[in-house]
Amino acid sequence: MIIVINNIPGLLESPDKLRAFNNILMSFGEGKHVLWMPSKKIEEIISQKIISGYNQQVLYELKERSRLTKSLRDDFDFYVDVDFEADNEYFLVDSKKLTVGYVHFIDSSSVQLPVFIAENLSDINFYELGSKVYLKEHKLLSQYDIKFRKVSGGGNTTINSFELHCQQKDLLLCILDSDKKHPSQGVKDTAARFSDYPVGWGDRYWLHILDHTEAENIVPWRIADRALGSISASTQEQFRGLSPGLRRYLDHKEGMRVGEALSMDDRHNSNYWRGILPAGKQPEVWICEPMGQRFLDKCLALMGEMSVHKLSEEIDRDRDTEYMCIARMVASWGIGLKSAIR
């Protein structure tokens, strides 16, 4: 994450403030986060000679980077602003700024890597690759990387992990499949277990439930097409005929027939599928045949074999907007220095 400290009043007089500041400096030096402070404030702290050892070296490096790092926060969805004036721990979201009371950082565990929770590791890796493309597109890949503590597990494991990390006061990102096959359906399966937690910003977390069925539905179009070339020529041809609307709630693993889609419209008193399906199709006709249970893994294997620069070329700027929107938020949570300060 990007951490911003604009001022630290009373640093000399407060052991707690000094401890919190040292913890943040250490996490920056280890490459876990990105830190920005005004260069004049850094010079003031250096002149006070209250920071020593490795953190003193980090402070000098922070000063060298200050001018270039200042504009970095404009490229991301949010940054953490540490409030060293209020003597309590609190979290306040205002536009792109997550304000956190310095008391949160007194415990060194609070400055470890942010937690990324999803239903399985493949989902996390999928979004992480997109976030690296986001760094590349903003010419940040040479100096920065994406880093998380990754936590995965389906069913009750996901909600249990989420609640455990909330109880531990970890800062965490959570992205879930909706498992909906129709826009009028409620979220299902794992996402349904999160009904007690607001979507978006919550207490120390950001929770996102896909406005698609699952991660497979937002695999970049060109990557999906490549993967299907090794699975089934007929399925690949059907996929190429899909519109973004058809693909949004299509079950990629199991496939979907026209009759199933129309039946869902009937159950929900809706014309969603009727409004986007070609007229005159018989119920037994496939909208798209099954792509298989390992479709996402095959796509991930393709993406993993590519350099980030090559993967960026495979992104369709018109059709892959949902994927890249999520990638930007993931990058905002996971950005850290590529290498630790030595």
Image: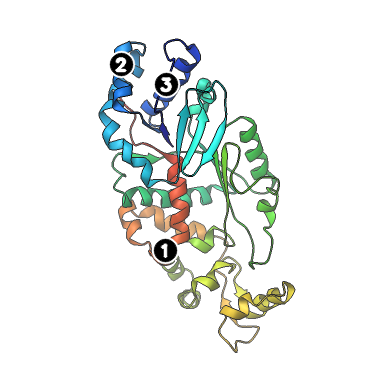
The one nearer the camera, 316 or 237, is 316
* Local crowd size for mark 3, using a 10 Å CA cut-off: few (<14), some (14–19), many (≥20): some
**Between marks 1 and 3, how big is the CA–CA gap?**
48 Å
Give me the C-alpha separation between circle 2 and circle 3. 13 Å
| x and y percentages locating residue 178 in the rendered image | 62, 57
277 or 78, which is in the foreground? 78
Q: Is residue 257 visible?
A: no
Single out the mark in the foreground, 1 or 2: 2
Residue at x-position 53% and y-position 63%: 217
User: Answer yes or no: do the residues labelled 1 and 2 have beta carbons within 8 Å?
Assistant: no
Identify which amino acid the numbered label 2 is placed on.
Answer: Ile
- Which numbered disc, 1 or 2, marks the residue that appears first in the sequence? 2
For the point 46% across and 35% down, which residue is it?
80
Label 1 sits on a secondary structure element that is helix
> Sequence order check: which comes first, mark 1 or mark 3?
3
Closer to the eye: label 1 or 3: 3
Residue at image point 38% right, 41% down: 73
Q: Where residue 223 is drawn, which disc sits there? A: 1
Q: Position of residue 42 (x, y in %)?
A: 32, 22
**CA–CA distance between discs 1 and 2?**
50 Å
**Kind of residue at disc 1:** Ile
The percent coordinates of residue 209 (x first, y second) are: 59, 53
When the figure is inspected, residue 148 is found, relative to residue 26, above or below; the finding is below
The correct choice, above or below, for 247 with respect to 28 in the image is: below
SS state under label 2: helix
Mark 3, secondary structure of its residue: loop
Residue 8, label in figure:
3
Q: Which residue is mark 2?
A: 46
Q: Is residue 244 visible to us here?
A: yes
The amino acid sitting under disc 3 is Ile
